[in-house]
Each structure stands twice: as C-alpha cells, then as structure tokens.
Amino acid sequence: MKITHFISAFVLMFFCGGILGHSRSLRPFVINYNRSVYKAMSQNWAVAFDDIGRAYFGNSGGVLEFDGNNWQLHQHKSKSAMRSLFFDSKSKRLYSGCYEDFGYWERDSLGILAYTSLADKLHSYPFSGERIWSIVKHENEIIFQSFPAVFTYHTITNEVKHVDPKGEILFLNHVNNKVYARVSGKGIVTYANGTFKTINNTDFAQRSTIRFFIPSKRGIIVGEGKTGLHLLNNGSLKPWDCQANKSLKTLDVNSAAVIDSTTYAIGTLKGGLYIIDDNGNILKHLDRQSKLENNTVLGMNIDQSGDLWLAMDNGISYIDLNSPVEYNIDLDYAPSAIYSVVEHQGYVYIGTNNGVFHTRFNQNLANLNFKELKPLAGVYGHIWKLDLLNGELLCGNNDGIYKIDNGKATALSLTSGGTDFMTFQHQGEEWLIESTYYKIRLQKRINNQWVFSHFVQGFQGSCRFIEMDHSGYIWMSHEIKGLNRLRLSGDLKTIVSNHSFGVKNGLPTDYGLNVFKLNNRVVVTTGEEIYTYDDLNDKMLPYKKLNEALGRFKEAVRIVNAGKNYFWVITDNEAALIQHNSDTTIIKHTLTLDSPYSFPDKYQNISIIGETSVLCLENGIAVLPIYNKDSTMHLPLVISGVYNGRSGLKNKEAQLPLHNEIPIQLKNKNNSIEFGLTAVNFGPNKVNYRYTITNLMDDWVDNRSENSVVINDIPAGKYIFRAKAVYSDGKSSNIVEYPFEVLYPWYTSKAGIFTIIVIIIGSIVFMVIFNHRIIKKRTSEIEQKHENQHKQNKSTIAQLREDVLRKELENLQSKLTVSANALVEKDKSINTIKDELHHIYKRLEGRFPQRDYSKIVNVIDNQMTQKRDMLNFEQHFAASQSGFYDKLKHEYPELSPGDLRLCSLLKMNMNSKEISILLGITVRSVEVSRYRLRKKMGLKPEENLTSKIMEF
C-alpha cells in the first residue's frame, strides 16, 4: 500500500480539564491519499464499506474502490460525480446517487462490479437537474434524497416511487430506527412509508441548514451549518452548550459519525475534523495545520475496525483510532535518524547520528516534545550504543565510552571509537569489555568505579556487536570482516584462540553477519536465515525450528531481547515481536515501517524501556507495549478474482467464477491459474498471505504481502487451492478454498484413445490406398517416361541416321562437284593439248608425219570424257540427289534423258561453257538445249532456269 503523506504523528495529550479520566485513549495517526495515488478526481463526497471491509468513496469521477492494496474507479455512464453512497449488507448492493440518476452496484459471479439504474423505472418523473445527496435504508425501503424530491426503492417488490416532501429537503439520517430530515416550511421531520411527520416546526428548524443527525446519550445531536451543534429531545431542539460548540458553531459543521457510544467525529467545511466526547469536550482536533490535507470534510464513515475515513474536498484521509502503536513523528524537530532511546533518572536520552540529545521527561514517550531536546555536552558524532547496564547508562561514540548521570557525561575512555560493550564476571570480579576501532579494551570495576585495565593482545580490529556464550567464548561480528570467536587467557590479557566463521563453517555468506543471544544461545543473523552454533561439530547450522516459526522474519538483520521470553526480530523495513519458549514460538505483533516513518538504514534498533518497546525511526519514534493485547478486528479473507490462461498469464484468457459447487475444469493447454486475494487492511502494517494446493504442494508457501498468486504449468489432476492471511498480530484468517481440475489431454481419455485408434487405422488405410495410388501413378509415369524415352531414343537414332546420311550425301555432293569439275578441267586440258598439237602440225607443214599425228590425236580423243564417264557421273549424282530425277519426271513427264542430264548439270550450278566441255558439244548447242528445256518446263521469260531446277 503506497502512502503519499503521513503528516506529523507526534501525539499530544488530548485530554484537558475534566476529560483526563476519559476511558478512550485517543492518539490517532493519519494517512492521507491524494489523486496521484488513487487516480481519480480530487473531490470526494461520501464513504461506504461492504461486507468484507472494502472501502468505497463517492468521487467526482465515479465510485472509487479501495481494498487496502489496490484502487479502482468505477464510472457511471454519464461520468458524473457520485455524491452519496450506502451499502446494504443484506443484499450486498452498493447504492449510489449522482446527477439525475440513482441505482445500485452489484458484483456478478466473476466479482465484477456492475451498475443498475433505478431512476430509469421512473418513467413519469421529469428530472430537472436533481442530484442525490444522501441515501438511507428504513425497513425494506432504500430512500434517496435530492433537494426537491425523495425517491424510494422497495427491496421486496422492486417498486420505485417518487415522494414529494412539499418543500426543500436536506440530508436524510437514520437514527434510532427512524429517518430524520429537515424540510423547508415544515422543520424537522421523520419519514416512514411515504409520509413525512413534523416533530419540530420552530422558525429556526424551518429555515436552518441541518446537515446531520447522530444518536447520543444526551439525545440526538443535530449539526447545523451556521450555529453548530444542537440537541434534539422529544421534539425539542436546543443549542448544545459545550466546549466543542464554541469552535464548531463558526466552522460550518457538515458531517458526523459515531466512533463509539461516547465519542463522535464532527467534520467541518472550514476547520477540519473534531473528535468530541459525550460531554461535548474536544478530544482531538485535526486540520491542515496538523495532519489533514485540507480543512473541508465532505463526508465520513467508520470502517469495520473502528477507524475513521474522511472524504475530503481534496483527497481522502484515513485516521487509525485503534492501533496499539503510538507514533511520534516530527519532521521539524525530531532528529533525522534515531538509533536508541533510554529513560534514566528522570531524563530521556536519544542517541542519534549527531550525538546524544536529552530532556527531563517522565511521561509516555508518545507525548515527547522533540522541540525540547537539547544536545548532551561533550558527546557528539555517531552514537554506536546507548544502553543501561546494571543501572548505569553507558554510551559509545566515535570518541570512546561515556558514563551518563543526571544529564552529564563523563568519559570512561577516549580511545578512538566505542562500537559495542558489555559486562561480565571473571573470578569474582566485574569487567567491562569494549570494542574500539582498533583493539579490545578491558576495564575493571574497583570501588564501584570503572578503571582502565589493559588492551587485549593478539587481536586487531573492531566489531559491531559483542556477545559471550555460556563457555566464556567472546563472539564478535563485523559487517565486512565477518564473525570471530575469541578465547581470552586466564588473566584476560591475551587471545589464546581466534576462530573465524563464514561459508566454510556452514554460513551462507562471509559478510553482513550479526551475533546475538537468545535464551543464552548464540545466534547469527545473515539476512537469509538465522543460524546457531553447534558446539559438538564446531559448525554453524540453520536454527530450523525458529526459522520455520518466524516465516519471512527469518531474514532478520537484528535481534533485540525484550525480556520475559520476548524478543524483536528486525528486517530492513519490518519488525516482529516474538514470544519464544522452549516449546513454542509465537508472533505477537508485526509492524511494517515505510517512509516517512521507517528505520534508519543499517542501524535498525528497538529500545526496551520497562514493558514498552520504542522503535527508533527516522524523524521520530513509535511506542508499543510489549504485553499489549491487540483487540483489532480482522476482516475475513476472500478470493476476489480468478483468472485462467496459458503459462505466464500474460494474456488472461478467461475470468472464472469466484464460487463453484463443483470443481472448475481447466483445459490442459490452459493449465495456469491466478488467484486474487483480499483481506482488507487499511493500516500501515501489511497483511501477509500464505497458500498451498492439495495434491501439488506439501507445505504452505509464504507469498508475503503479494495478494496475487500465480501458478503456472499445473499438471493434469484435481486440486484445491487454499489460502489464508496472517495479520500483524500473528493471527491467521479464515482459510479460503477453490477446487479446480486440470483436464488430461483429450487423447488420454477412452473416447480420445478410441478416436486415436480410429484415426490410426484410418490413416493406415488411407496411406495404403494413397500409396497404392501413388505407386500406380508413379508406375504409369515411369512407363510413360520409358515410352517417351524410347520414342525419343528412336527419334534420336533416326535423327542420327538422317544426319549420317545427310553428311554422306553432302560428302557425295562434294565429291560429285569435284569430279565434275575435274572432268571439265581434264577436257579443257586435253582440248588445249589437242589444239596446240594441231598448231604445231600446221607449222611444221608436213614435216610431222601424218601417221604419227593421227595416232596422237586418236590417243588424245580417247582421253576425252566418254559415255562411260558420263554414266558414272549420273550415277553419283542420282545417289547424292535422291529423288531429283523422280521429282522432275513427276513434275515434267515430257523431259527426255538428255533434258534430265542437262538438269543434273545445272543442279551442279555449271554454266553453259562448262556443260559444253563436259558434254563435248558447243556452247551454242548447250544454249539451244537450255531453251528447249525452258519451253518444256513452261518457264516465263523472267524466271531463271537454274533457280527453278535448284528447287528440286
């Protein structure tokens, strides 16, 4: 719980004159909340409490809910101010009134607060700016008051009615089983069953601004804005002539509450809060100058614990009227860090970080006026220890050890530092052992005076705490240097043994160790657990029994003996008073100390003065009787929310009902659950929560002050969540239970197993059919592939054959061309030789024999291309030009063999001269043959014969 502002809690004597003997000791402290904390509007109008103690405030932004841990704003659809609230414990409905609407808020099965309008049922009533200012219940009617009208809701018949008061009506109050109000023109009236009855019609009553009626032994106390308090008896109204009214009649009284049968709280618009008794005496006045945020009190109510809540014009104030702890905090005059408090010889002495302060004082320390403190001359700097030893007040500081008597200090030693000291008996003599910054110093009592004896040899250093066990060993602890056990020689002058303890001896750490004694047993605080010395095994062991009893307080950093089997354990910001016997360990009271009333860091201490514990705080002290019987009423623990989701609950998938007759079943995939717990506690001391889950946990788990429990990844099974609250006095609340079941995965049930078998069989059948089809398809594909491959291979082979034939043909064509050209060239050469021979023969003019010439010419003629050569040519041509002749004959059947021969030579792209040589005819004959061939082929003049033949 965050506390925004705790104003000075120093407690003055509230009793004056005739009230000193009053039965109620009223020393309240105040916690103020502002809008930055509760996240709503500043102005608050009304206060109500539900059946488990949750507080509701009529805020200008809506209904503001507070359970001691969390604030939540519930807004009306119009977002208008909620100026009145009333909780009906029978129906568990919170009734509220706002601008032109009234109705109730009710929690559903999930714990969510939802609004239902009742004004909507008044179809015939014309609202015109009405605001609902007060709500009361009388018998079976809920009555809502606005200035011009009254509205009633019958809780049995659910009927909503409008009642005309015939005048302006101010503020309803239910007193002594009657409903009182003031109606203009009528005076003070009572209401019942739709009828107003006037009981006082004086002029004052008719025109007054009466704001409240509360019961008292003297009659009904009536609060009127301009004239203060009055008493109403048997219809007679008279001003109350009392001490309180002398102040209240000028402060515009506005609201009131009955604290108990003889004590009343009166709220004003100008002067804050007054607490008075039944004689009209002021017991306490709280205003902006003392503790409240402001002086305007708009509404108030008493919670189930008897503490007072104020709805303020700017914020909310909680006033603890019943705490056994009396806080005395003074931000202006108290030392900023108090380390110890001692009463001695009519003085009170306070050890601080800046010397010792003192004053004459012999009253309750809760009433100490810090402004009267004065520094003790000669004792300055950090005070390490201030304590009474055998009736003597000794003080250790930076300079050494002092003895203090009647407000004066005398130095016993001026060796640097006096961090701790203690007395012990040795050989019938009393000794004082001191730890300085460097050595151990011993003093001996001689003639009732402490006299320096010697420094102990063999040990260098200092310590924070010193203890001596039953065997005479001296234990010294230092937060940095650790823990040592020393044995002194018989003459106490030297160290004969020095054994250090740390991790190697069973402790969890070597640092931050502090040594103390409990019931003559050495114990060590570690900040994790408390350890004790096992002398049989020369080892440190966890003090198991004590740790189990202390719970979270096993993490103590300091232990203070309080006498008669009582001791305090102190953590960083908490303290617990423990009653410890050989058989039992009981937590009697716990305190949570948050800023601004907290322990000084690293110097937490509680001073014991007689039967009173004095908590040494920053800027003050707190006083608590050790043997106090705390009568605080504890509110029940309830489960306020249940959420279900996947592991981690980062996204809460479902909100579950708060109550269930049969276990809630959770899906296996949503096997995480969160429980919200509420044990309403409004004071500064925290409520701690513990929980366990049957079939999942063996022991109770300490959840500390966290009121939300998250359990993740719960295995399948049936469970019962159980939780309890542990209050500041060590008492436990009722145990709440919530049964639930995490279902097994669907596949583990009979139906699931059957389904799986069916699925498996179906899958097998499907796979067989599927595989068969796949195999068939694959076989078909392979066969098709092979067939295609075969076709492709055949095509490839045919293509290869065709390529081979084409290459062979090309080769034959090449050879044919070469052969044809060779024949032509041969005939050309032979003709050239023949012509040259003929010229020679002519030139010789008969000298060359005719017979020889003819013989040579015959030989030459025989070498000319013969018919045989031409036939071979035509055969080679036909082989290389397959189908050439057939195509020509088919196209031109009238072609002769000679024409075909000419066509073959033209196909070889030979010109007329070459053809003439090859055929042994003239060029002219070739041209004539070409002409005839053109005619047979029917070529046009512009068509080329050779090109035409090339097409075949």
Image: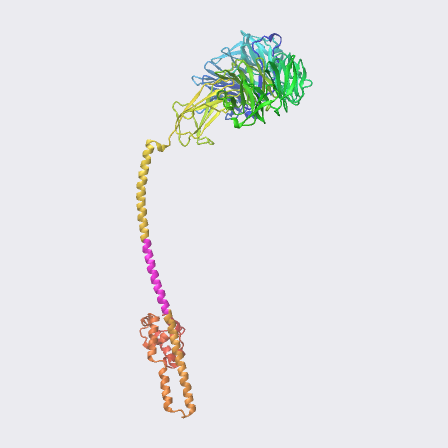
Please tell me in which quadrant of the rendered image residue 949 appears: bottom left
Which residue extends farthest bottom?
846
582 part of magenta stretch: no
Q: Position of residue 592 (x, y in %)?
A: 55, 21
Q: In the rendered view, would you say 74 is above or below 253?
A: below
Q: In the rendered view, would you say 408 is above or below 697?
A: above
The N terminus - image quarter: top right
Q: Nearer the viewer, residue 585 or 129?
A: 585
The C terminus - image quarter: bottom left
Q: Nearer the viewer, residue 567 or 952?
A: 567
Q: Nearer the viewer, residue 853 or 581?
A: 581
Q: Which scheme is used to colour this image of the protein?
A: rainbow
Query: Taken as a whole, is the magenta stretch helix, strand or loop?
Result: helix
Please tell me in which quadrant of the rendered image residue 857 appears: bottom left
Please tell me in which quadrant of the rendered image residue 235 appears: top right
Q: Residue at x 37, y 70 (%)?
A: 811
Looking at the image, can residue 275 be seen? yes
Looking at the image, can residue 207 be seen? no
Number of marks: 0
Q: Position of residue 626 (x, y in %)?
A: 55, 14
Q: Position of residue 899 (x, y in %)?
A: 34, 76
Q: Position of residue 554 (x, y in %)?
A: 51, 22
Q: Nearer the viewer, residue 381 or 844?
A: 381
Q: Which residues are magenta?
A: 784-809
801 part of magenta stretch: yes
Give left or right: position of 834 versus 181: left
Which residue extends farthest right?
377
